[in-house]
Image (cartoon, rainbow, N blue to C red):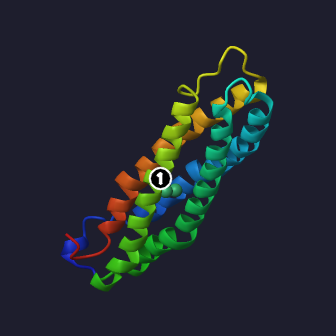
Amino acid sequence: MAETATHAKARRPGAAGALIDTILATHHGLARELAGRAGSLAPAVAAADAARDARLTEVAGTCALLEREMLSHLQREETVLFPVIRELETEGADEGDVGMLFSPIVCMKREHLGIDELFASLRSLTDGYTPPAWASADHRALLATLAAFEADTIEHVRKENDELFPMASDLVPAVR
Ligand SMILES: [Fe+2]
Ligand SMILES: [Fe+2]
């Protein structure tokens, strides 16, 4: 638990906790809102217009899966990984804490890839979120929601994968 030279690099005090606060305030609330909006619009759009574009049924199924996966992912970060990072930052860490941190990081990174694949499917099924000329207001709203959701998720995942997780890793000594 002692401060050592090997993990001094991440010791801007409170930096990881502050980044977690930013991620929660900027992305987690918005992700819940957009997942819920897409999850409720998609079945109505499919019911109304799947006869014109059969892919809308698959869009609705993928939106339901995305909503479920995103909500459980946010929950796991908020209840498992983020509290561990906050604790390591405030209480200090030693080599014994490696597993406590790295298992959830590996798990969250895998989930990020899964979420990315769901967005790739949705992008492909909707021609890059482009509404057809005949699209209803709900259909257009669904595509705009998905485009905004994917854009926000790219930045959300970038902050976690490229900033927060390396910062958290630096809290644990003798990992490198
Ligand atoms: Fe997150
Ligand atoms: Fe995440």
In the image: residue 33, left or right of residue 22: right
Q: Is residue 1 visible?
A: no
Helix, strand or loop for disc 1: helix
Percent position (x, y) of residue 48? 80, 30
Of residues 26 and 145, which is closer to you in this image? 145
The amino acid type of the residue labelled 1 equals Gly
In the image: residue 118, left or right of residue 145: left
Classify 87 as above or below 169: below
Classify 151 as above or below 110: above
Percent position (x, y) of residue 122? 56, 37
Q: What residue is shown at x 39% (from left), y 73% (from top)?
A: 103
Q: What residue is shown at x 42% (from left), y 59% (from top)?
A: 110
Question: How dense is the environment of label 1, judged by Cα within 10 Å: few (below 14), some, or many (20 and up)?
Answer: some
Q: What residue is shown at x 67% (from left), y 31% (from top)?
A: 54
Q: What residue is shown at x 43% (from left), y 66% (from top)?
A: 107
In the image: residue 30, left or right of residue 175: right
Q: Which residue is mark 1?
A: 114
Percent position (x, y) of residue 23? 52, 54
Q: Quadrant of residue 46?
A: top right
- The residue at the far top in this view is 133
Give the position of the N terminus as an image quadrant. bottom left
Give the position of the C terminus as an image quadrant. bottom left
Percent position (x, y) of residue 86? 47, 71
